[in-house]
Amino acid sequence: MENYKFSKKMESNYSLSSKHLFKKKAGNSKYYYQLDFNENLENDLKAIARFAKKENILFKIFGMHSNIYITDNGFDGLFVDISPKNGKIEFDKDSETFKVTGNLLTSRLVNFTMEKGYDFAALTGIPGMVGSGIVGNAGWTPTKKSFSNFVKKIILFDFESEKEIEVIPDENFFSARNSKIKEFNKNRTVYIVIGAVLKAEYIGKENVKVKVDEQIKKRRKSLQAGYKDGCAGSIWANPILKTETGKTFPEMLKENESLKANFNGARYGDEGSMFFTTGEETTDKDVAKLFVFTLEKLRDLYHVKPKMELLILDYDGEIDLDTFIQRNYNNI
């Protein structure tokens, strides 16, 4: 088996506190590597696969502004951080499609396509990278659109075969805030989105700009409040809540004061965003208390159990909400 060396230094015992937008401190990762989308990309992807197999450890890959909560324990594996540098977008005039790299910022996608007159306005204000948006099928609930409305082809790197593959999504590939890629990657990382082909309706630059400006105006207050509070986006999947109850979680918070609580800084934002946030002294136990409190309140008020949109990374990899509660609330 051919050996692949990383193109730059891997770090050890790396603090992950800066890798989520919460104010809460996070633990360390056993190993850390920043992945660049450059001429070394294929080499580094193969190096990641070989290193993980050799060391018999998990690795997880996250883009900038990923909607992730990292526990006090950190991660006993390899945390791969995708660099936003060198994100590329190309317009194919014949097919009227846009070929993008997985690390392209969504904001750049919206701005570039707006200049061409193509309507990706529904993705306005979605933070992070296109690859992450595809994996999580990100969107803004009022538009009733998400990445799945625009994705025609996905280029993946398969860490098992160490080869590039192309996927044409069918009607079962995406669901609300979810995709087959996200499901495959839950227990261990199998795929990374390295590129995609996207398509949207042509309506002209001025018409797109009107829609983008309208959405920015609607979202500005919540986005500013979210960054001020220190959060990474929604925690409960609003499309599912909207379907089951007719209301999003922010709407529920606005009409029910009893849903608002503060467990040592673990709370929902006061203004605009209503996003989950934390304080510098917040612990996992405090967060677990807020989650349990919220689940009980939503059960009593709306007879619903929400689906968590937030990813939780613990020492042994990605864990679900029930496991997080078991480890940090049931053992109090």
Image (spheres, rainbow, N blue to C red):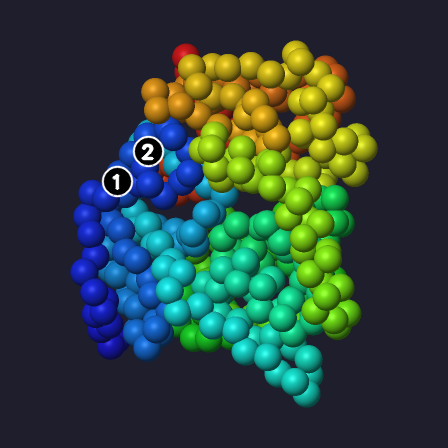
Residue 104 visible in the shown view: yes
**What mark, if any, has residue 15 been given in the picture?**
1
Which quarter of the image is occupied by the N terminus? bottom left
In the rendered structure, the answer to whether residue 14 lies left or right of residue 212 reads left
Element at label 1 = strand
Q: Is residue 217 above or below residue 276?
A: below
Q: Which residue is mark 2?
A: 26
Picture quarter containing residue 123?
bottom right
Q: Residue at x 63, y 70 (%)?
A: 115
Q: Is residue 16 above or below residue 94?
A: above
Near-viewer residue (97 or 156): 97
In the rendered structure, the answer to whether residue 168 lies left or right of residue 61 reads right
Q: Is residue 188 above or below residue 29?
A: below
Q: Residue at x 55, y 26 (%)?
A: 269
Residue 82: image x %, image y %? Answer: 38, 58
Which residue is farthest bottom?
A: 94
Circles 2 and 1 in contact, beta carbons < 8 Å: yes
Residue 16: image x %, image y %? Answer: 31, 40
Element at label 2 = loop
In the rendered structure, the answer to whether residue 67 lies left or right of residue 251 reads left
Picture quarter containing residue 92?
bottom right
Q: Residue at x 30, y 51 (%)?
A: 78
Near-viewer residue (44 or 205): 205
Sequence order check: which comes first, mark 2 or mark 1?
1
Near-viewer residue (11 or 144): 144
Residue 256: image x %, image y %? Answer: 70, 16
